[in-house]
Image (cartoon, rainbow, N blue to C red):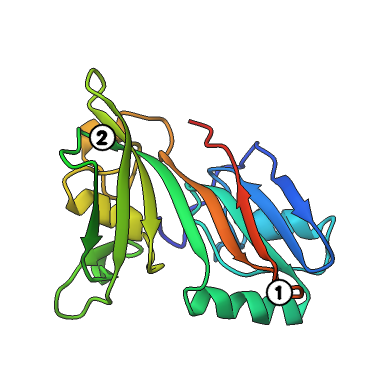
Amino acid sequence: MGEDFIVPLCQETVAILFVDESIILVDKPSGLLSVPGKHPLNKDCLITRVQQNYPDALIVHRLDMDTSGVMVLARGKASLSHLSRQFQERQTQKQYLAWVYGLLDNDEGAVDLPLCCDWPNRPKQMVDHVQGKASLTYFEVLERRGENLQTKVLLKPVTGRSHQLRVHMAALGHPISGCGFYAHAAAFEQAERLQLHAWKLAFSHPVTGVPVQQTAAAPF
């Protein structure tokens, strides 16, 4: 997706899951940018929609346009600073649900492969054992569908590299179904949208310090 690409209008709404004076928890639909794109026609996004009702909302982290699921927004700069630090220091816990191509042999495991930007083909990323940054993902098999050649997995990224889950699963030989970047034709045609959903997010409340955990059911 280059800078000249115009994102189709996302017809789905942003679900507000929780609001208080410091944070907003939302369920982002697939097909919606987290922040405005570079093209002037790509202004519709999660943060601009939320700011229509909550003008003090600020972006803390992002999900890819094609990925749906839970995100936390900060209300005010103090909350933004506190939440951003938690993400930077890996004090948050993120879990994703995905359908991938093929039947995984192992019920659980880890993918520990360094990633970096594939500059000639950006925004794609790639495994690079020389220049790549350490990237770690744990996976757990939830369901296998032999007739569809698909496996449902729970993904737990330790690091938060761009496209990490997509590249790691593709490197295992099991690309995420419906992925337009890394899936081969058979995997891409398994679904009309990317089968990746941010199911659970856990962090500490920026004011009270109380543990916060939010889930959102996967739409697939």
Residue at position x 20%, y 33% from top? 102
Residue 60 located left or right of residue 186 = right
Q: Seen in the image, is 35 located left or right of residue 139?
A: right
**Picture residue at 78% right of the left edge, 76% below the top:** 76
| Residue on which disc 2 sits | 187
**Residue 25 in view:** yes
Secondary element type, mark 2: helix
Q: Is residue 44 left or right of residue 141?
A: right
Residue 157, position as x, y percentages in the image: 38, 60
* Upstream in sequence: badge 1 or badge 2: 2
The residue nearer to you, when weighing 158 against 84, is 158
Which of these two is toward me, 107 or 29?
Answer: 107
* Residue lying furthest front: 210
Q: Residues within 10 Å of mark 2 (few under 14, many from 20)?
A: many
Kind of residue indicated by mark 1: Pro
- The residue at the far top in this view is 147
How many angstroms separate mark 1 from mark 2 (CA)? 40 Å
Quarter holding the N terminus? Answer: bottom left
Tag 1 secondary structure: loop
In percent of width and height, residue 187 lies at 25, 35
User: Which residue in the structure is indicated by mark 1?
Assistant: 206
Q: What crowding class fits label 1: few (fewer than 14 Cα within 10 Å), some (14-19), or many (20 or more)?
A: many
For the residue pair 126 and 42, the one nearer the viewer reads as 126
Q: Residue at x 74, y 53 (%)?
A: 49
Q: Which mark is residue 124?
A: none
Res. 126 image quadrant:
bottom left
Tell me the residue at 69%/45% (across/down): 14
Give amino acid for label 2.
Answer: Ala
